[in-house]
Image: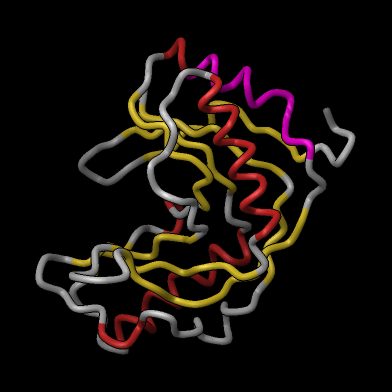
């Protein structure tokens, strides 16, 4: 099973994503395969292809939820991965990410306790908007503020989800395996 742990994007923000993608296309981002807004999540930890037994262990380690109070994050700048060389991913970043980093570290510790390897890359909170085609250039997007219609909007983080990803010709389809709440400082 291919699984990951992520925060769902609230509907008001998800509804703004097609307009943001369209405005980027109109601004010259032509060699980008746009991610369907319904497929955009704030990934905390990608687990990869793992056995059903390991998925069960991950769920047990994350249960009953995280010992953090709900918090807000703010949508920020547009950027590209990797930061140098040919771009592969166009993303929308976040501001005010200290609590988000703490949550991601907590999730990573629990996932590793379920016998998965440590993630090699540092956690970089972002929403993947699109993937560049071979030979594409990012232009002057890296580090720019998102348009005012979406940039600076706040998003409440109250829970996170263990998702299963089903890959297919129409793109990935996501199934909720289990949802976990942020329980507050005394939650566990």
What is the span of residues highlighted in magenta in the rendered image? 55-67
- In the picture, the quarter occupied by the C terminus is top right
Q: Where in the figure is residue 170, as x and y percent of width and height?
A: 25, 45
Q: Tell whether position 60 is magenta.
A: yes
Residue plotted at (39% across, 84% down): 23
- In the picture, the quarter occupied by the N terminus is top left
Is the image coloured rainbow, by chain, by secondary structure, or in one colour? secondary structure
Q: Tell whether position 124 is magenta.
A: no
Which quadrant holds residue 185? top right
Which quadrant holds residue 52? top left
Residue plotted at (18% across, 73% down): 31
Q: Is residue 161 above or below residue 44?
A: above
Residue closest to the far top: 53
Q: Is residue 27 left or right of residue 107?
A: left
Q: Is residue 32 left or right of residue 18?
A: left
Residue plotted at (62% across, 70% down): 95
Instruction: Please tell me how many numbered marks the rendered image carries.
Output: 0
Q: Is residue 139 above or below residue 183?
A: below
Q: Nearer the viewer, residue 177 or 53?
A: 53
């Amino acid at each position: 099973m291919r699984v990951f742990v992520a925060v769902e994007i609230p509907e008001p923000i998800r509804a703004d994503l097609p307009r943001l993608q369209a405005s980027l296309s109109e601004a010259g981002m032509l060699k980008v395969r746009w991610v369907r807004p319904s497929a955009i999540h704030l990934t905390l930890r990608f687990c990869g292809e793992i056995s059903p037994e390991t998925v069960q262990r991950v769920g047990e380690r994350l249960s009953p939820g995280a010992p953090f109070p709900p918090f807000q994050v703010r949508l920020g700048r547009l950027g590209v991965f990797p930061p140098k060389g040919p771009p592969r991913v166009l993303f929308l970043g976040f501001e005010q990410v200290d609590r988000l980093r703490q949550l991601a570290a907590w999730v990573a510790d629990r996932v590793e306790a379920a016998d998965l390897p440590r993630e090699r890359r540092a956690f970089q909170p972002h929403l993947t908007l699109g993937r560049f085609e071979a030979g594409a250039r990012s232009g002057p997007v890296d580090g720019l503020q998102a348009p005012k219609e979406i940039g600076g909007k706040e998003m409440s983080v109250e829970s996170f989800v263990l998702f299963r990803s089903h890959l297919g010709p129409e793109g990935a389809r996501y199934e909720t395996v289990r949802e976990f709440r942020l329980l507050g400082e005394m939650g566990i």
